[in-house]
Image: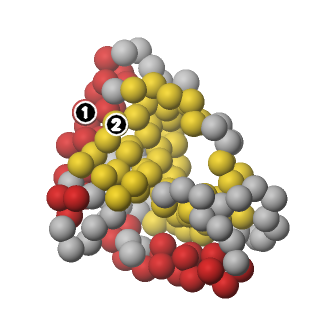
Amino acid sequence: MEIKNVRQTTIYAHEIKTSLKLIGEHVKVLPEKILEEIDLKGLAITGPQIWIYKGADGNPDTVFDLTVGFPVNPGNESENVKILESFKCTSIIHKGDWGKFKETYDKIIGDVFKNGHQMTGESREIYHQVDFENTENNLTEIQIGIK
């Protein structure tokens, strides 16, 4: 577990309400839609895809707020350009299939409590490498907001 302070980031994003049970409907589809819009607007992507979860509690039926986006250069005007404020978090790298996220989440959340931190209710997934053909190549950073 690594504690880090992620700096403020400007992203082009879509915000939806979903649940862990239904989140699979948005994988690949929502990021592709966002990438098309970014391309049409002529924006430059400056980093990997980010998924931001607010209110997800691990229960498959809990409805929560999900923001999916890509970092872009600051100063762009658009209803879909959002500023992510700086974010204090614990961070862990998940290698491989996203179907095994639960194990990685259980580990990092256990470490958060073991080290006396409190969670903020926000978590982020940074998709550094995405490979739908060979999922063992996926490289995802999981960040849990802490106080």
Task: Please indicate whether residue 2 sits to the left or right of residue 45 in the image.
Answer: left
Write down the residue under mark 1.
Answer: 107
Residue appearing at x 67%, y 42% in the figure: 8
The secondary structure type at the circle numbered 2 is: strand
- Badge 2 local density, few (<14 within 10 Å), some, or many (20+)? some
Write down the residue under mark 2.
Answer: 92
Task: Please indicate whether residue 104 sits to the left or right of residue 88 in the image.
Answer: left
- Badge 1 local density, few (<14 within 10 Å), some, or many (20+)? few
> Residue 50 location, x and y as percent?
50, 56
* Nearer the observer, 84 or 135: 135
Question: Is 109 above or below relative to 45?
Answer: above
Is residue 83 visible in the rendered image? The answer is: yes
Which of the marked residues, 1 or 2, is nearer the chain's N terminus?
A: 2
Image quarter of residue 132: bottom left
Residue type indicated by callout 2 = Ile
Question: Is 132 above or below relative to 72?
Answer: below
Is residue 67 visible in the rendered image? The answer is: no
Residue appearing at x 31%, y 17% in the figure: 114
> Residue 73 location, x and y as percent?
71, 59
Say whether marks 1 and 2 touch (CB < 8 Å): yes
Q: The N terminus appears in which quarter of the rendering?
A: top left
Residue appearing at x 18%, y 68% in the figure: 134
Question: Is 18 above or below relative to 53?
Answer: below
Task: Please indicate whether residue 144 sits to the left or right of residue 9 in the image.
Answer: left
Q: Which mark is residue 122?
A: none
> Residue 62 location, x and y as percent?
41, 56
